[in-house]
Image: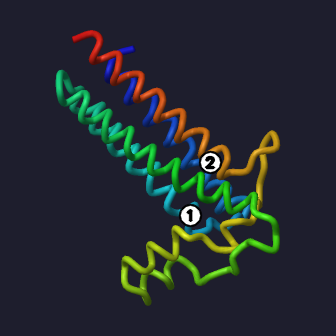
Amino acid sequence: MSTRMFFLTVMFSCIALMVFGLYLEYVQGLEPCPLCILQRIAYILIILISLMGVIHNPIDIWKIIYKALLFFTAIIGACIAGRQVWLQHLPPELVPECGPGLDYMLNVFPFADAIRMILSGSGECAEVQWRFIGLSIAEWSLIVFVTISIMTLFSILAEKNNS
C-alpha cells in the first residue's frame, strides 16, 4: 500500500468514526463523558496527522516521523479508551462518583488538576449508554486505537525492511 493510501485510509476511517460519534450525540442524544471527549481529541489529532501525510506524501525519514506521530497518538487514545473500559467493568460499589462536567473542570481548576481529574474518570465515564454486538463505545474505540497502532507499527517496520 502506498504511503498516501495508508494515510487516506486512516484519515477517512477516523472521520467516519467522528461522524458516527456526532450522530450518537446530536441525533441519538448520548452525552459524551470527559474520557469520550479526550478520545475524540485523539481521533482529531490522528485525522490531522494523516491529512498532513496525505498532503505532504512524505518519503524517507519523514514517512517514519509521520507514522511515529500517528502511532503514539493512537497509543495515547488506546490508554484513554482502556481507562474508560476499566471503569465500565468495575463493580457498581467501586465506580467513582459523578464529577463536574469537562467545561467546568477546565474553567475552574488549574489545567494540570483538570487533566488529572478527567483521566481519573468519574461515574458518568463508567456508564454504558450504547452497545453494538455486545461492546460499548469505549470498547470499540479501544479496538480501533489498537488496530491503528498495530497497522502503523507494521507499516513502519515494513518501511525499515524496504530501505
Q: Position of residue 45 (x, y in %)?
A: 38, 50
According to the picture, the residue beneath numbered tag 2 turns out to be 20
Q: Position of residue 135 (x, y in %)?
A: 76, 45
Q: How many marks?
A: 2
Residue 105 in the figure: left or right of residue 20: left
Cα–Cα span, label 2 and label 1: 17 Å
On residue 35, the disc is 1
Q: Amino acid at mark 1?
A: Leu
**87 lies above or below 106:** above
- Picture quadrant of residue 6: top left
Residue 92 against residue 6 in the figure, above or below: below
Q: Are marks 2 and 1 in contact (CB under 8 Å)?
A: no
Q: Residue at x 40, y 28 (%)?
A: 153
Q: Amino acid at mark 2?
A: Phe
User: Mark 1 packing: few (<14 Cα in 10 Å), some, or many (20+)?
Assistant: many
Front label number (2 vs 1):
1
The spot of residue 126 in percent (x, y) is 71, 65
Left or right of 99, for residue 68: left
Q: Residue at x 39, y 14 (%)?
A: 1
**What quarter of the picture does the C terminus occupy?**
top left
Q: Residues within 10 Å of mark 2 (few under 14, many from 20)?
A: few
**66 relative position to 62: left or right:** right
**Of 26 and 139, which appears nearest the observer?**
139
Residue 36 location in percent, x, y? 58, 61
